[in-house]
Image: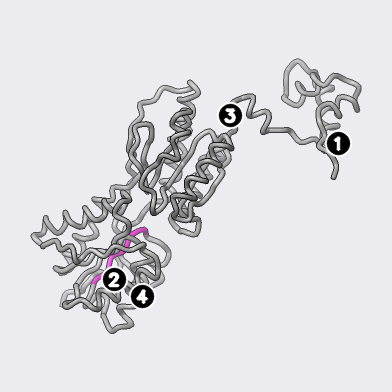
Amino acid sequence: MSKDITIYDIAKDLGISPATVSRALNDHPAVNGKTKQRILATADTLGYRSNMFASNLRKQKTNTIGVIVPRLNSNFQSSVMAGMEKVANEAGYNLIISQSLEAMQKESANAKTMYDSRVDGLLVSLAYDTENIDHFKPFFDKGIPVIFYDRVAEHKQCIGIVIDNIQAAYKATTHLIENGCKDIVHISGNLKINVYADRLKGYKYALIDHNLPFKESSVITTNLSEEAGKEAAQQILEMEKLPDGIFVANDTCAATCMKKLKKAGVVVPGDIAIVGFNNDPISRVIEPNLTTVDYPGYEMGEVAVKNLITLMNHVAGQSDILITNTITVRSELIVRDSSVRKAS
């Protein structure tokens, strides 16, 4: 294996000082044009690679942003990544992306790796079982900006980027009520996570505002996977009286729940109207097409990186900003056939 070429090799080849080579490679004006061209040509011929890591250590900046996501095989997270990548690249930053696989233990290990990699800032969507954020303390102590998005934690040094999950769930539930539903089941995720706790609140508020009773038995808590959708459907089929509406906290779970209900002879939306959440591609494939809440992942990714860069510049003394703890991104209800009952 050949050794890496250094500035000393280039200097020896050209018979000039290593300091001159270094200045030329860094485009220093003290080196005249012809000498600079000779140095760059020789560096290219010898196969010289700039040691960006060492250079960045000297500058106390790596131009990298760490991102920790629950899962990469998620349509929402893929959209977020695309938005992040666009803004980061335009600003001269690279992303280092890792996934927690919905486990706080792995999320903690990922955070340590990001810290040891000296990322300039960190973007995080919390794992399904994360109940405290002590593993991000080194970032807080060091003054490295951290922004949580989607699944967020409250911390005085952090910004959270979310949609108004309460309002979105309120609209989804109200839509079912306006289509004649009076007994609505809510299939939720881990209620210790902000997004699912807020969607439950929105569901409750809609029932209260329309004088419908809230029943604990109408809330089914799951991990919102495909399998969870089938299990929730079975639980619904075994109820003494079938509900006439279902509001599910994500589209994957909603789709598999709908599929199993239809297989059991339930007519959607005639017998049970269904609304999902996220506007994933599956919502447009399943029949009937699924009414859902559009969750603008691309926009959320753009907003997250823009705000993180602003924070990083602020830490570096390059900007004056007023920090807000929560940024809310717009969302909207997309009405499709799974929830609309035609008037007779």
Q: Secondary structure at mark 1?
A: helix
Q: Which of these two is toward me, 179 or 212?
A: 212
| Residue 274 belongs to magenta span | yes
Q: Nearer the viewer, mark 4 or mark 3?
A: 3
- Secondary structure at badge 3 equals loop
Secondary structure beneath dot 4 equals loop
Percent coordinates x, y for residue 301 in the rendering: 45, 45
Callout 4 environment at 10 Å: few (<14), some (14 to 19), or many (20+)?
Answer: some
CA distance for labels 1 and 3: 28 Å
- Check disc 4 and give the amino acid type: Glu
* Mark 4 to mark 1 CA distance (whole Å): 61 Å
The tag on residue 338 is: 2
Query: In the rendering, which numbered label is found on residue 287?
Result: 4
Say if 244 sits above or below 42 in the image.
Answer: below
4 or 1: tag closer to the N-terminus: 1
**Part of the protein shown in magenta:** 273-278
Mark nearer the viewer, 1 or 2: 1
Residue that lies at the very extreme toward the top in this rendered image: 30
Q: What residue is pinned by disc 3? A: 61
Left or right relative to 291: residue 70:
right
Q: Name the residue that disc number 1 marks.
A: 46
User: Nearer the viewer's eye, disc 2 or disc 3?
Assistant: 3
Q: Position of residue 218 (x, y in %)?
A: 20, 66
What amino acid is found at the position of numbered circle 1 in the picture?
Answer: Leu
Task: Decide which of tag 2 and tag 3 comes sooner along the chain.
Answer: 3
Q: Amino acid at mark 2?
A: Ser
